[in-house]
Amino acid sequence: MAAHQKLYEGKAKILYATDDPNVLLSSFKDDATAFNAQKRGSIQGKGEINCAISSHLFQLLEAQGIATHFLDCPSANTMRVRAVKILPLEVVVRNIAAGSLCQQTGLELGTVLEPPLVEFYYKNDALGDPLLTSDRLLLLNLATSEQVEQLRAKALKINQILTDFFQQCGITLVDFKLEFGLDPSQNLLLADEISPDTCRLWNQSDPDPKQRVMDKDRFRHDLGNVEAAYQQVLDRILAKAAQI
Ligand code: TMP
Ligand code: ASP
């Protein structure tokens, strides 16, 4: 097969063109970054693990009526996806206070957020991905007000589905980040990835605040055993999926 043209290289994935202009290949890397790439490293096996986790979660969401860019996985670290124009937004859903929410508001780590909080961040590395207000979203033409409401509703529905599923895996979905894109017919598709790189996941069988962390916070805060935690998330998803 002819080499695929590299279209874009991000911090955790590379996008390649295929012979079909409507289909791209997303190759998941072991590279890891945090704090807007001020911290860099590698998590051995992460590319394959995150590709497998994302594939399972996209298929779970598709089965429950959420349109995603996922097509299939031609190899362990490669996903075939529908080509979409990514909106420059990071949609974050939070069920429990952690991370930047605690830093910026003083809320105590672990505070339950009911109803869940939906936030929009500007996907712009040069500006450090700032938190947006609804008015700033419109001001910068990042989405129409109709799209903002569509994104919020979709994000909350995705949260419900993923929270229920992770609960069955003995994992608490603390918060996560989503990205969306528009296909050529302007349909809004869930894109990018859903993995321990983009979610906070706490092991329900371990109450210790450091031990329970099963996500990229292990890398961000040098908690150790990063690979094992990611693998444990995949193992639990596969075990649960086998029962469904
Ligand atoms: P935060 O608490 O740092 O704002 O992160 C909220 C969630 O979003 C958390 O699950 C990690 C995820 N996230 C990303 O996927 N990419 C990012 O660049 C950042 C800052 C957070
Ligand atoms: N992925 C982001 C980065 O490196 C931040 C993070 O996940 O903490 O820039």
Image: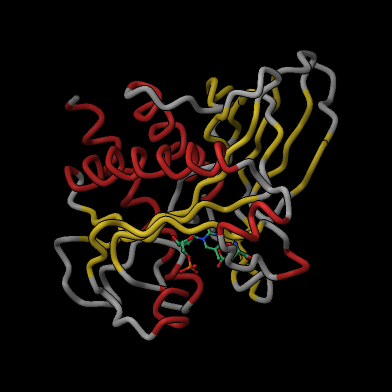
Vertical side of 230 occupied by 226: above or below:
below
Tell me what residue is drawn at x 30 percent, y 78 percent.
109
Total of numbered circles in the picture? 0
Horizontal arrangement in the rendering, residue 31 relative to residue 6 (left or right): left
**Viewer-side residue, 143 vs 229:** 143
Vertical side of 58 occupied by 121: above or below:
below
As drawn, the residue found furthest toward the bottom would be 106
Residue 164 in picture, x, y percent from top left: 21, 42
Residue 23 in picture, x, y percent from top left: 69, 20
Tell me what residue is drawn at x 81 percent, y 26 percent.
4
Dividing the picture into quarters, in which one does residue 118 lie?
A: bottom left
Quarter of the image for the C terminus: give it.
top left
Dividing the picture into quarters, in which one does residue 124 lie?
A: bottom right
The way the protein has been coloured in the rendering is secondary structure
Horizontal arrangement in the rendering, residue 71 relative to residue 111 (left or right): right
**Viewer-side residue, 20 vs 46:** 20
Work out whether residue 228 can be spotted. no
Tell me what residue is drawn at x 73 percent, y 37 percent.
15
Quarter of the image for the N terminus: give it.
top right
Residue 41 in picture, x, y percent from top left: 62, 68
Horizontal arrangement in the rendering, residue 38 relative to residue 70 (left or right): right
Dividing the picture into quarters, in which one does residue 212 lie?
A: bottom left
Tell me what residue is drawn at x 58 percent, y 22 percent.
74
Residue 80 in picture, x, y percent from top left: 61, 24
Work out whether residue 183 can be spotted. yes
